[in-house]
Image (tube, grey):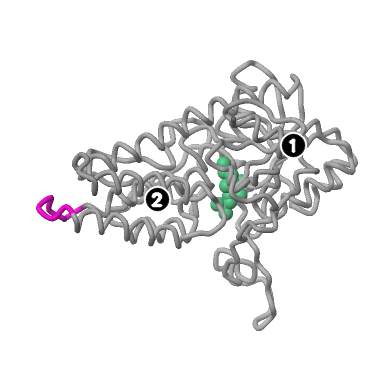
């Protein structure tokens, strides 16, 4: 059953975006991010289909968070099945992993997490431990590792940000998109933890307003001075006000450093280059896809036209009009000043530097 509650943006006592409740017979609890900031509603996922739907419709979103949610989704495939048929338990887990992989195509964290779950399934086929518990242990490890990576990203990134900085970000790469703290927002939260004073311009991020709805909400909870701007205002703001750095997250970064992130990120990077503003991409190692070199190879999710024509049910455009709605774009490595990972800072962003960073 879903639980509606009233969000309190001035406290940081909100539940986690992704949380496993109980043991291997437990369930996955998510914040329904489509309703924020108006309503803080928790969804309880008891089966794989509910998790798939939550990822597809962005109830849970952000590259690391969908990987974590999908891992727990595989755990749910074991529910209601008896340990008497270990082959069918493994088959249920494998088919759950395959199904969850069809939910969204761009964030490589999803496939990275499902690959890890596949390894556990294969180990159990080879006579390993009880599958349900092994799957839960792996999902919890993925979750916990992401939490640690986000905090490390924050610490490394904060070293790049001076006291008094004015920052700009796009979409939401915060606690809602990860286990905790986020990637781009982790840098901001860590600056604040260190006593630095910062202020942030948050792009609203059309068509689904992750910046206006989610980033603004998270920054407001932490009392970080925040100004929302329409996406089309960012170049003007860089031209007329002092922006010290742009920091964004990523959904997939290739071996040469091309980075896919929410649509609009590339334009922001072009503007940042023109105005001499450092452009940082903060992401954990689980966001790197070392099998791809050229960003053009990254699959870009195309989403429903209704998101543009009638966002959140509000009809804005004439019926019958053509729409193009790619959810992500790719920023070439040349436009990225530095990558911030849990291991440190990669600068300049080149294939050699990335290979060395992860060696
Ligand atoms: O479509 P979304 O909301 O899942 O897009 C999310 C982003 O683009 C984030 O910037 C990215 O996943 C990084 S989250 C730490």
Dividing the picture into quadrants, the one containing residue 47 is bottom left
- What label does residue 70 carry, if any? 2
Q: Position of residue 184 (x, y in %)?
A: 63, 36
The secondary element bearing badge 1 is classed as loop
The secondary element bearing badge 2 is classed as helix
Q: Describe residue 77's horizontal placement relative to residue 248 as left or right.
A: left
Q: Position of residue 187 (x, y in %)?
A: 63, 29
Residue closer to the observer: 275 or 341? 341
Residue closer to the observer: 10 or 287? 287
Residue 268 vertical placement versus 161 (above, below): below
The prevailing secondary structure element of the residues shown in magenta is loop
* Mark toward the start of the polypeptide (2 vs 1): 2
Spot the residue most to the left: 84
The residue depicted at 78 percent of the width and 35 percent of the height is: 337
Q: Magenta span has 176?
A: no
Residue 141 vertical placement versus 172 (above, below): above
Residue 231 vertical placement versus 142 (above, below): below
Q: Position of residue 169 (x, y in %)?
A: 70, 41
Quadrant for the C terminus in the image: top right
Q: Which residue is mark 1?
A: 349
Range drawn in magenta? 79-86
């Amino acid at each position: 059953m879903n639980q509606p509650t009233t969000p309190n943006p001035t406290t940081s006592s909100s539940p986690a975006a992704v949380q496993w409740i109980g043991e291997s017979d437990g369930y996955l609890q998510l914040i329904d991010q489509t309703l924020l900031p108006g309503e803080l509603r928790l969804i309880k996922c008891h089966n794989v289909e509910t998790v798939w739907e939550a990822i597809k419709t962005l109830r849970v979103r952000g590259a690391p968070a969908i990987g974590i949610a999908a891992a727990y989704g595989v755990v749910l495939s074991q529910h209601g099945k008896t340990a008497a048929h270990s082959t069918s338990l493994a088959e249920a887990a494998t088919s759950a992993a395959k199904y969850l992989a069809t939910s969204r195509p761009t964030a490589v964290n999803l496939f990275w997490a499902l690959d890890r779950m596949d390894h556990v399934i294969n180990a159990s086929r080879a006579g390993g431990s009880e599958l349900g518990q092994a799957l839960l242990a792996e999902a919890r490890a993925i979750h916990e590792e992401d939490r640690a990576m986000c905090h490390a990203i924050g610490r490394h990134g904060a070293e790049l940000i001076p006291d008094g900085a004015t920052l700009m970000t796009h979409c939401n790469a915060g606690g809602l998109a990860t286990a905790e703290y986020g990637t781009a927002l982790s840098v901001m939260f860590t600056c604040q933890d260190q006593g630095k004073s910062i202020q942030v311009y948050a792009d609203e991020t059309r068509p689904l307003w992750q910046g206006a709805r989610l980033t603004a909400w998270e920054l407001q909870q932490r009392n970080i001075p925040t100004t929302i701007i329409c996406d089309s205002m960012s170049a003007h703001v860089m031209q007329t006000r002092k922006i010290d750095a742009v920091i964004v997250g990523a959904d997939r970064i290739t071996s040469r450093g091309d980075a896919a992130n929410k649509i609009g990120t590339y334009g922001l990077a072009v503007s940042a280059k023109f105005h001499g503003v450092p452009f940082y991409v903060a992401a954990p190692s689980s966001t790197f896809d070392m099998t791809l070199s050229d960003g053009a190879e990254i699959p870009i999710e195309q989403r429903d036209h209704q998101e543009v024509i009638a966002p959140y049910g509000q009809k804005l455009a004439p019926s019958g009009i053509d729409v193009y709605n790619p959810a992500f774009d790719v920023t070439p490595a040349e436009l990225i000043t530095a990558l911030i990972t849990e291991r440190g800072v990669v600068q300049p962003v080149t294939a050699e530097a990335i290979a060395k960073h992860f060696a």
